[in-house]
Amino acid sequence: MTGFDAIIARDQRIEPRDRMPDAYRATMVRQIAQHAHSEIIGMQPEGRWITRAPSLRRKAILLAKVQDEAGHGLYLYAAAETLGADRADLTAKLISGAQKYSSIFNYPSLTFADVGVIGWLVDGAAICNQVPLCRTSYGPYARAMIRICKEESFHQRQGYELLMRMTRGTPEQREMVQEAVDRWWWPSLMMFGPPDAESPNTARSMAWKIKRHTNDELRQRFVDMSVPQADALGVRLPDPELRWNEERGHYDFGEVDWAEFRRVIGGEGPCNAERIAVRRSAHEEGAWVREAAEAHAAKRAGRAA
Ligand SMILES: CC(C)(COP(=O)(O)OP(=O)(O)OC[C@H]1O[C@@H](n2cnc3c(N)ncnc32)[C@H](O)[C@@H]1OP(=O)(O)O)[C@@H](O)C(=O)NCCC(=O)NCCSC(=O)Cc1ccccc1
């Protein structure tokens, strides 16, 4: 065994200059681009609360979190570029709908409690999925993931801390938290992707050590982790079938609405059109910045010559 297969078998990293099967490269570009797009689109649900945060402290925290998400998108686009992808082309594919981003960001953030619940559940699910990606087989992606996970873990704690404050507040605040949990719980479970039996990419991505666990394994890990956290907050997870299974050593949980998942990734979620429209207009309105940066770079290069 030599080359690519030997590197994978030894559990070492594939680096940009290594030979790799075309399908490995295509899978990596697909996953990294989808991940980068998710970070960038993911700024929108929380971003709309920055101007309406209830205190200066909450505003500063939220602003920092949303800025981190932009940074994550940038590291990830840079990782995709090491595979030969072109950043402008990836953005064009996001805007045209040719590439996906996470289903979760197609749901609206209706109250300030959503900021806390996104931090707790959405960042919690992201961490569950992404910590194993620190050991993914493609070097630049694995290394980007280390810093991203550290920041996501801060994001998750800020969400949980916000919810702790709100659940110890007024009955209205507690109700607001419960209502947000009711809306975000099931979509959070969908973040892990389709069930293993219906996941076309899992087997090959596991063989290539891109994915270290299957979608269902990570979903289970997330449920097991979230139940005690919900108890500590004093909120109810909206699943009547959720109960501890002594034999399995895991929580049993109800069936995700996979028809809804397919609708959302097919473009029919509550906010798909709005998310893409906002991204498209930001891109178009930012054209002058890209042009100015290019003109500046050309001028500097001319001067150096
Ligand atoms: C697990 C999975 C998401 C999917 O496994 P795979 O082996 O790749 O696919 P599989 O065969 O199982 O699925 C078949 C098809 O369905 C697609 N699809 C599946 N699930 C979803 C979905 N939920 N949404 C949309 N599409 C989904 C999938 O791409 C594939 O598409 P294809 O038609 O083939 O092109 C994997 O790509 C992964 O780990 N990605 C990295 C993590 C990542 O991207 N995290 C981002 C969110 S966290 C964040 O942004 C942080 C944050 C927090 C708070 C605020 C702001 C930011």
Image (tube, rainbow, N blue to C red):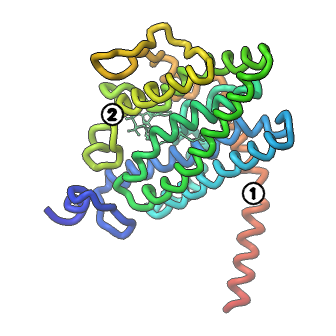
Q: Which of 135 and 72 is in front in this view?
A: 135
Tell me the mark number nearer the camera, choosing from 2 and 1.
Answer: 2
The reply to whether the residue tagged 1 has its Cβ within 8 angstroms of ligand 1 is no
**Residue 148, image x and y in percent?**
55, 52
Q: Is mark 2 within 8 Å of ligand 1?
A: yes
Residue drawn 74% across the image and 40% down it: 47
User: Looking at the rendering, in which quadrant would you find the C terminus?
Assistant: bottom right
At a point 56% along the width and 20% down the height, the residue shown is 231
Q: Can residue 274 be seen in this view?
A: no
271 relative position to 131: left or right: right
The numbered mark at residue 200 is 2
Q: Residues within 10 Å of mark 2 (few under 14, many from 20)?
A: few
What's the residue type where badge 1 is placed? Ala
> Considering the image in quadrants, where does the N terminus appear?
bottom left
Q: Provide the residue designation for mark 1.
A: 287
**Category of crowding for the residue at label 1, using alpha-carbon neighbours closer than 10 angstroms: few (below 14), some (14–19), many (at least 20):** few
